[in-house]
Image (cartoon, grey):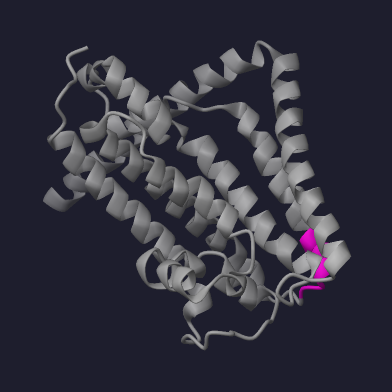
C-alpha cells in the first residue's frame, strides 16, 4: 500500500509539472506565431546560413574528392546527425544557454523563478522556446537525407532502431553541457566561453571525421570529453567503415550511454548549484 501511494505521488508530480511545462511552451509558441511572417523569415535565414556553410564544404570536397578518405555523403552523415541533434537540443534547453542564463542571474530575474511553487528545472526549461531554431533542425534533416542518398547506407533493422538513440545521445550530451555552463554562472555570473567551446565548438568539430585531427586532440575527445563516441563511432557503424583506432566492438553503441550519463551528471551539478546559490542582490 505504501509503495502504491509513493508511485501515485510520483505520477501526480510528473503530471503536474508536464502540464506546467506544456503551458509555458504553449504561451511562447502562440506569442511567436503572432508574427508569422517574421517567424518564417527567421527560419529561412537560419536554413540559408547553414546551407551556405555546407555548400562551401561540398565545393571543397568536389575539388579534392574526399576528406581523410571520406566522401561527401559520408561527411554529410556526420553533419546531418549533429545539426539535427544540436537544433533540437537548442530548442529544448535554450533556457539553460549559459550566455542568456548568466544575464538572468546578473539581473536578478532568476530569483523570481525561485519564489514560484514550481520545480525550478521545469521553469528554466520552459523559459525559452525559440521556434526559429526549427530552421536548424530542418537543415539537419535535409543534409541527413542527402547523406542517405549519397552514402549508399546498407540499412538493417538494428541500424534503424539505433539511429534515434544516437540523436537522443547527442541531444542529452549538448543539453548537459548547457546545464553545466548555466550552473557555473551561479559563481561567475558572466557566461563561460569554455562552455561555448565545448558546445558550439564541439558540434562544429563533430561534423568532420575524427581521424583527421591530431593525436593529442583525439585523445582529449576520447578519454576526457568522450565526444568521439557520440557521432563518429556510430557513423562508422552506419557506414560500415572499419575502426581506425581499434577500440572495443561496443564503442559505436556508447552514444546514448555517454549522452544520458552527461545529462544526469549535469542535473546533479545543477541541484548542487541551486542549493548553494546566492543572489547577486540586483
Question: Which residue occupies 17% across, 14% down?
Answer: 281
Q: Can the viewer see residue 117 in this picture?
A: yes
Residue numbers of the magenta segment: 146-153
Q: Taken as a whole, is the magenta stretch helix, strand or loop?
A: helix
Task: Tell me if 98 is positioned left or right of 113 in this view.
Answer: right
Query: What residue is shown at x 36% (from left), y 52% (from top)?
Result: 263
In the image, 130: left or right of 139? Answer: left
Quarter of the image with the C terminus in it: top left
**What x and y, as percent, mark residue 275?**
13, 36
Q: Nearer the viewer, residue 41 or 54?
A: 54
User: Residue drawn 17% across and 21% down?
Assistant: 279
Q: Looking at the image, is 39 positioned above or below residue 173?
A: above
Instruction: State yes or no: residue 211 in magenta.
Output: no
Quarter assignment of residue 130: top right
Position above or below: 264 against 242: above
* Residue 44 point in image, percent of width and height: 76, 30
Residue 215 in picture, x, y percent from top left: 49, 76
62 on left or right of 45: right
Residue at the farthest right position: 63
Numbered label tally:
0
Q: Is residue 1 among what the camera can see? A: no
Residue 203, horizontal then vertical, whole percent = 55, 52
Relative to 21, residue 213 above or below: below
Residue at 82% across / 73% down in the picture? 152
The magenta stretch spans residue 148: yes
Amino acid at each position: 500500500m505504501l509503495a502504491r501511494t509513493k508511485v501515485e505521488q510520483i505520477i501526480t508530480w510528473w503530471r503536474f509539472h508536464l502540464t506546467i511545462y506544456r503551458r509555458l511552451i504553449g504561451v511562447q509558441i502562440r506569442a511567436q506565431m503572432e508574427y508569422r511572417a517574421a517567424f518564417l523569415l527567421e527560419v529561412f535565414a537560419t536554413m540559408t546560413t547553414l546551407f551556405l556553410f555546407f555548400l562551401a564544404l561540398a565545393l571543397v570536397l568536389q575539388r579534392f574528392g574526399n576528406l581523410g578518405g571520406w566522401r561527401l555523403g559520408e561527411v554529410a552523415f556526420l553533419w546531418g546527425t549533429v545539426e539535427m541533434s544540436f537544433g533540437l537540443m537548442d530548442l529544448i534547453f535554450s533556457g539553460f544557454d549559459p550566455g542568456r542564463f548568466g544575464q538572468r542571474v546578473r539581473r536578478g530575474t532568476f530569483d523570481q523563478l525561485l519564489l514560484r511553487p514550481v520545480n525550478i528545472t521545469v521553469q528554466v526549461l520552459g523559459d525559452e522556446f525559440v521556434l526559429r531554431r526549427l530552421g536548424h533542425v530542418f537543415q539537419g534533416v535535409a543534409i541527413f537525407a542527402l547523406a542517405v542518398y549519397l552514402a549508399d547506407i546498407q540499412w538493417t533493422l538494428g541500424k534503424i532502431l539505433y539511429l534515434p538513440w544516437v540523436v537522443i545521445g547527442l541531444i542529452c550530451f549538448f543539453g548537459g553541457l548547457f546545464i553545466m555552463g548555466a550552473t557555473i554562472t551561479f559563481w561567475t555570473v558572466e557566461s563561460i566561453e569554455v562552455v561555448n567551446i565545448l558546445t558550439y565548438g564541439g558540434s562544429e568539430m563533430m561534423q568532420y571525421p575524427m581521424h583527421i585531427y591530431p593525436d593529442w586532440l583525439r585523445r582529449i575527445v576520447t578519454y576526457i570529453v568522450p565526444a568521439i563516441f557520440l557521432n563518429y563511432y556510430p557513423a562508422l557503424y552506419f557506414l560500415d567503415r572499419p575502426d581506425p583506432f581499434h577500440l572495443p566492438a561496443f564503442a559505436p553503441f556508447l552514444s546514448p550511454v555517454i549522452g544520458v550519463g552527461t545529462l544526469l551528471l549535469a542535473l546533479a551539478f545543477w541541484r548542487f548549484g541551486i542549493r548553494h546559490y546566492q543572489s547577486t542582490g540586483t
